[in-house]
Image (cartoon, rainbow, N blue to C red):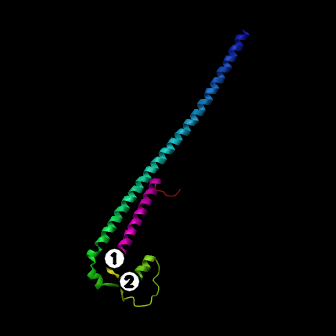
Amino acid sequence: MKVLIAALATLLLVACGALWWEHRTATGLAGELDTAKTAALSADFEASAARADLVTVTKFVDRVQVVRETTATIRQEIPRYVTPAADRRYLLPDGFVWLHDAAAAGVSPGQRAGDPDAASEAVTASQALDVVVRNYGICHETAEQLTSLQEWVRSHHPGGSTSP
């Protein structure tokens, strides 16, 4: 009888040890499963964000390409609307050139020697128009870049708030 009780006690201890071991293993596996789920969700989120970024960049590139094509088309039309004969008749005064250059540089024109109304032999209306068209093209490209940046920020902050 003592042997039977000892055998049952031993069997009970072995069963408890096995149950403890299984519990420990199951708990560890549950933790690993939680970690794997978190990693999968994170990877899915990052992939989704990357796809959204790709869409935003693609839209931006497409819109900029349209702006560049439109600008190139307008520049090709300059000789049609400002003919060489008109260029010879209407030379731009130095004052126009000075102010345009100051405005483009974002500086005050300051004082210049000479007559600002005098005709400039170097700048024709078609040349000035070409510069203006290119400048507007750059302005529209920059506007598209800003619009795309705003869309990107909104897609990463869906609540509308851009502050952390």
Task: Name the residue beneath numbered marker 2.
Answer: 96
Residue found 28% across the figure and 80% down from its top: 84
Q: Which mark is residue 129?
A: 1
Looking at the picture, how far across and down is residue 153, in whole percent? 46, 57
Task: Tell me which amino acid carries mark 2.
Answer: Phe
Corner quadrant of residue 68 = bottom left
Q: Is residue 76 magenta?
A: no
Looking at the picture, how far across and down is residue 160, in whole percent? 46, 56
Task: Tell me which amino acid carries mark 1.
Answer: Leu
Residue found 47% across the figure and 79% down from its top: 107
Q: Is residue 152 magenta?
A: yes
Looking at the picture, how far across and down is residue 127, in whole percent? 34, 78
Indicate left or right for 98 with 84 as reference.
Answer: right
**Dominant secondary structure of the residues highlighted in magenta in the image:** helix
Residue 157 appears anywhere in the view: no
Residue lying at the far top of the rendered structure: 1
How many numbered circles are shown? 2
The magenta span reads 129-158
Residue found 50% across the figure and 41% down from its top: 40
Corner quadrant of residue 137 = bottom left
The local crowd at label 1, few if under 14, some if 14 to 19, many if 20 or more residues have their Cα within 10 Å, is: some
Corner quadrant of residue 152 = bottom left
Q: Is residue 155 above or below residue 101?
A: above
The local crowd at label 2, few if under 14, some if 14 to 19, many if 20 or more residues have their Cα within 10 Å, is: some
Residue lying at the far bottom of the rendered structure: 114
| CA–CA distance in space, label 1 to label 2 | 12 Å
Q: Quadrant of the N terminus?
A: top right
Indicate left or right for 113 with 30 as reference.
Answer: left
